Amino acid sequence: MSTVLVVGAGPTGLTLAAELAGAGIRVLVLDKREERMPWSRAFGLMPRTMEMLDLRGQVEPFLDAGLPCSLPPVGDGKSHLDYSRLDTPFPYILILPQQRSEELLESWAVKAGADIRRGVEVTCVRQYPDHVEADLSDGSVERADFAVGCDGVHSVVRASAGIPFTGREYAQSLVIADVRLRRPPESDVWARIAPRGMVAIYPFGDGTSRLIVLDRERMAVPISTPVSVEELDESCLGITGREFGAHSPVWTSRFRSSQKHAQRYRSGRLLLAGDAAHTHIPSGGQGLQVGVQDALNLAWKLIAELEGWAPPGLLDTYDEERMPVAVDTLRKTDLAFRFETANSPAARLGRRLVNTAMSSKSLQVNVMREFAGLTLKYPRLRGDHRLVGRRIPDAPLHGGVPRGTRLYELFRDRRFVLLDQTIDGAVARDRGSARLTAVHSKAQGRPDWPELVLVRPDGYVAWAGDVAGKSSLDMRIRQWCG
């Protein structure tokens, strides 16, 4: 049986393990931590992340555990972003501490058949023409067909592959804390941006809240300095004019971010995903989202390689598709950080102008779609339909499937999906296979979709067009499905 070694049991590694194990691949996940991470760290799921979980039928436990926030504040005390305007089944940010997300992802992976071992550190990975070997801290050696580094910014897999990790560190420090508040704000989710800095508060639903503090008067404080509740109160008072009475801290962190990415995501049988491949400041809450998307992009291609049906170069498209996404995310989060931390007169004026501009509904939608992960585009060929390379939205289906079936439900078995909306359905009848679910059905509420849409297992369009172009469809099926 084919084996994949996943190093790191964070959200990226657990998602990848669940995907691979669900396809019958033997997966061994190794993590040096003795226990699952007890802190919240990342604390939200964006709409596209929930859509991707929905593709596999796994989103419900996350929805049950989290708190939806459809109106996150802009920070001026008046305006909000209205996520309900987005075209998605999940028009909100789901507030969910990372330790809970990891618990649910681990449950999915274990049920799928993944073997997760904690308290075992990988010290080195070597690769050979037909396998990899990992040296473990207990002196043993594990052998696998591939190894994927999901082991963070200090990745052993990345170092073993000799892949450079370039970028820069920020000099400014920020503070986050999970605390209880004696005087919580009047709204559940609350934020203010002021000349001295920014304060944001997100409730977790258990009496604790995430408190984020960007205090320009304290950004030079060494990260080794502990965060006290007195400091939190003083900074909140100085920035917003309000003191929230922080107490009973569960977790606090003073940190400096960095902007770095690996120069490539694959070296033979060694691959990188999540923070091992890219790291950036937490502005916009994109870290966990990009890591989960890495995992969904890589998994089906690695499955194809291990099952022997991958077309030439398929696994290389993981690097080709995901690295530009990370580079773009780093660029945008860097701009956001500079926007948040700069204190020149021009920067202060810029923040006021942006807050004013956010009253524009069209600008709001563009910003929200970016945060939500709905704007991602993979490369397409000249002449391709505009849908190619984009995420496929969900839609109720009519005809050819049981009543009430949604498009996303067709992806539960990790196969390609061909949606045939022609009158006679002949294309679907001729092209179904073990790797391709072909359905003759109509997507309700999507009048702008062409007659034929071919969608990859990760929910991105591989080809789209009308029946006159079915020869092009067949070429694209061979290109992607083998």
Image (tube, rainbow, N blue to C red):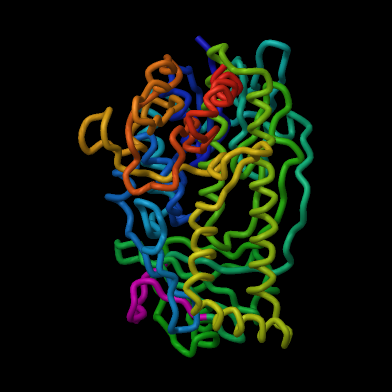
| Residue 100 place in picture, x, y as percent | 38, 48
Q: The magenta stretch spans which residues?
A: 179-192
Q: Is residue 61 visible in the rendered structure shown here? A: yes
Instruction: Report the label total.
Output: 0
In the image, residue 171 sits, relative to residue 417, either above or below, namely below
- Residue 302 x %, y %: 57, 23
Asked whether 476 or 158 is in front, the reply is: 476
User: Relative to residue 246, is residue 203 depicted above or below?
Assistant: above
Q: Residue at x 52, y 35 (%)?
A: 464
Q: Nearer the viewer, residue 134 or 437?
A: 437
The reply to whether residue 182 is visible in this rendering is: no
Q: State yes or no: residue 180 in magenta.
A: yes
Splitting the image into 4 quarters, where does residue 435 fall? Answer: top left
Please give the name of the residue rendered at 31% of the width and 50% of the height, measured from the top-left corner.
63
Q: Nearer the viewer, residue 308 or 383?
A: 383
209 vs 300: above or below: below
